[in-house]
Image: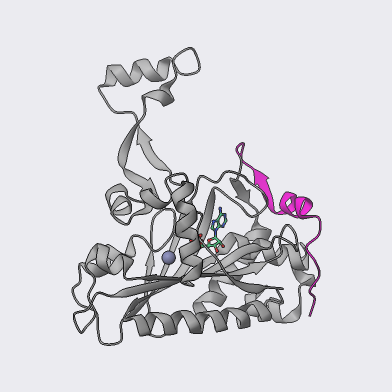
Amino acid sequence: MNYAAPTQIESIVHALFEPMGTGGVYARTSRFERAIDGLVGLISRYRAPQTEVFKFPPVMSRKQLERSGYLKSFPHLLGCVSCLHGQETEIRALVDGAGASQDWASALSATDLVLAPAACYPLYPIVAARGRLGESGQQFDVTCDCFRHESSYEAGRFQSFRMREYVCIGSPEHVLAFRHDWMERAKEFADVLALPYRIASASDPFFGRAGKLMAVSQVEQELKFELLIPVNSQQNPTACMSFNYHRDHFGTTWGIETAAGNVAHTGCVAFGMDRLALALFATHGIDLQKWPKSAREALSV
Ligand code: AMP
Ligand code: ZN
């Protein structure tokens, strides 16, 4: 297998994307999208029977995300949709002044929408509204364009990126088995793509000083693991997938019940689509025809 170290990531990024005038946001070329399409197909082939599929829009309800606790944990990453409210004359005056002394952006006010920061948040209220789960819980396949207000934009850290997730909702046993199986399957997935990787315990980028404690506790409880692949460097490999156990957090927040009437537990396995595609190019080079046979076959490229 070709386990070449990623080289010249800057030139690879240059070959795959066109800049769009601001950091962490790119126009994706057809070369890049061929890898994305291949990954979409490959991930779908891993979908368990009876999995329900949802494609979410890039925006979601601000109230729902607040209720999920996102604002307490990650206020620094959140983007909110803001608009100009008011009468025609007020809005006209603001935009006519734009570019001159008047700053139309400072007149924006929040709508009831935020930019989705992950694909699974809109799922839990939908499931809760349906009543109790079936005996064996349920699995979902969810996709969303996500936004995060990142503080740096090295290769692979985008403001706007695509996330695909398999989500399991059920008893703690269901969810832990789901996550365990996926951590094994992810190794197969990386092997077939001839990607060098390791799986490591991880924490989310919680906000502030209190957040540091939350991160420590998350690692202690082994609530998050990541599949890491060298993209920028061998020393600091990039998280391309995550395996998350939320325990009863969303079950309690939304009132999701198992068949037995207990609070449901939830877990998700997230595929960072743009990062996985970039990792393929970083490892195997920009010429898809030269990629290892197993990867080309798996991705149909
Ligand atoms: P997380 O919810 O942080 O575990 O994110 C799930 C997956 O999304 C990660 O494993 C990454 O592959 C991907 N991801 C997270 N943040 C970004 C970002 N800023 N740019 C690109 N991909 C990201
Ligand atoms: Zn999730």
Counting from the top left corner in percent of width and height, residue 118 is at: 44, 58
The C terminus is located in which quarter? bottom right
Q: Where is residue 38 in the image (x, y as percent from the top left)?
A: 60, 71
Residue drawn at 71 percent across, 64 percent down: 230
Q: Is residue 192 magenta?
A: no
The percent position of residue 265, horizontal first and vertical second, equals 32, 74
Q: Foreground: 85 or 37? A: 85
Q: Which of 268 and 289 is in front in this view?
A: 268
Residue 258 in the image: state x and y as whole percent.
Answer: 24, 80
The quadrant in which residue 236 appears is bottom right
Q: Which residue is drawn at 42% across and 45% down?
A: 75
Judge whether residue 219 can be spotted in this image: yes
Image side of residue 66 versus residue 224, left or right? left
Q: In this view, does 141 lie above or below 24?
A: below
Q: Which of 125 and 300 is in front in this view?
A: 125
The number of numbered discs placed on residues in the rendered structure image is 0
Q: How is the image coloured?
A: one colour
Q: Which image quarter holds the N terminus?
A: bottom right
> In the image, which residues are magenta?
1-22
Ligand 2's image quarter is bottom left
Q: Can residue 243 be seen in this view?
A: no
Identify the residue at horizontal 37%, vertical 48% (top origin).
71
17 with respect to 260 (left or right): right
From the viewer's perspective, is residue 33 above or below residue 139? above
Looking at the image, residue 153 lies above or below residue 124: above
Residue at image location 37% in from the left, 67% down from the top: 54
Q: In this view, does 67 lie to the left or right of 73?
A: left
